[in-house]
Amino acid sequence: MKTKQRIGIGIIAVLLLGGALLLTRVQLKSMILQVPALRKLIGHKTVDEQIETYGEQARGRLRKLFESRSLTYPPDKLALLGFKNTRKLDVYVSIKDSPYKRVVTYPIINASGSLGPKLRQGDMQVPEGFYRIEALEPNTPYHLGLRLNYPNAFDIEHARLEGRDDPGGDILIHGSNGSIGCLAMGDVVAEDLFVLANDTKSKDVPVILCPVDLREFNPPPASPNDPAWLPDLYKQLKANLKNYPAH
């Protein structure tokens, strides 16, 4: 092992030992990742480094898509609509506050669970509801990812009212072809979504996840295990989807 590597590993060990006593896991990770040499040693890349790696090819693909729809790249606004039953992710954009227009529909390669909301950790469900892209994830076991703000305030409040201690979390739209509660899109599409979200001028990106396309179909039949608030959520989703013209 090279001397620099030994020194780097030694520094990490000291930080971990001290951090375990004084810092939270998040604080410790943040501290380590602020040191470029340590980031490189553990193979961690920043968003900017991943954009530098994948940006040129992804932007080439994206510009072709936008040109085919007579749209300017990059857009001012971005929205993602996911439908469980058909395993499709619609990408909508807005240019200069114009109405949203669909650019492309990507197939969802894999998504665990069935129709219905996510209620607890370990239920294997993809959430249903109104979400946002909370962060770009440059380092995941599934290539690149977009992290959703699940559980949101709605999820947390209903979990509290129903006595569900752990509604789960760590939900992403990511690459690869495996998923546990997330949307697996394949690596190339994940690169395009990662770069598109990075380049879009507004960083407030809505993500709407539905059991079916409620613009065209009725919600799935209710089951005895459905929470009482689910029909109202579906009504809200249907009303909001009017902002995104069906293709």
Image: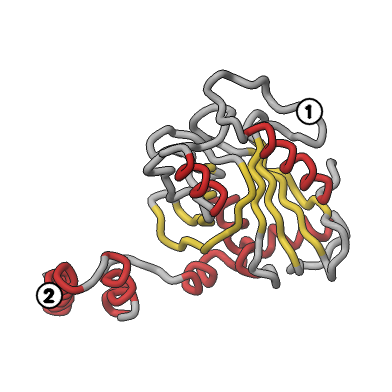
Q: Is residue 144 above or below residue 86?
A: below
Residue 221 falls left or right of residue 92? left
* Residue density around tag 2, few if under 14, some if 14–19, many if 20 or more, within 10 Å: few
* Residue density around tag 1, few if under 14, some if 14–19, many if 20 or more, within 10 Å: few
- Give percent across and percent down for residue 59: 67, 64
- Give percent across and percent down for residue 163: 41, 39
Disc 1 vs disc 2: which is toward the camera?
Answer: 1
Q: In this view, does 34 lie above or below 71?
A: below
Residue linked to disc 1: 217
At mark 1, the secondary structure is loop
- Residue found at x 54% / y 27%: 114
Residue 24 falls left or right of residue 101? left
- Give percent across and percent down for residue 18: 14, 74
Residue 107 falls left or right of residue 227? right
At mark 2, the secondary structure is helix
- Residue found at x 72% / y 51%: 91
Q: In terms of depth relative to the viewer, which is nearer, 204 or 66?
A: 204
- Residue found at x 60% / y 64%: 195
Q: Which quadrant of the structure image shows residue 33?
A: bottom left
Please state which amino acid type lies under the numbered disc 1.
Phe
Query: The N terminus lies in which quarter of the figure?
Result: bottom left
Please state which amino acid type lies under the numbered disc 2.
Val
Residue linked to disc 2: 14
Query: The C terminus lies in which quarter of the figure?
Result: top right
Colour mapping used in the image: secondary structure
Q: Earlier in the sequence, mark 1 or mark 2?
A: 2
Q: In terms of depth relative to the viewer, which is nearer, 188 or 79?
A: 79
Residue 150 visible to the viewer: yes
- Give percent across and percent down for residue 148: 53, 54
Residue 40 visible to the viewer: no
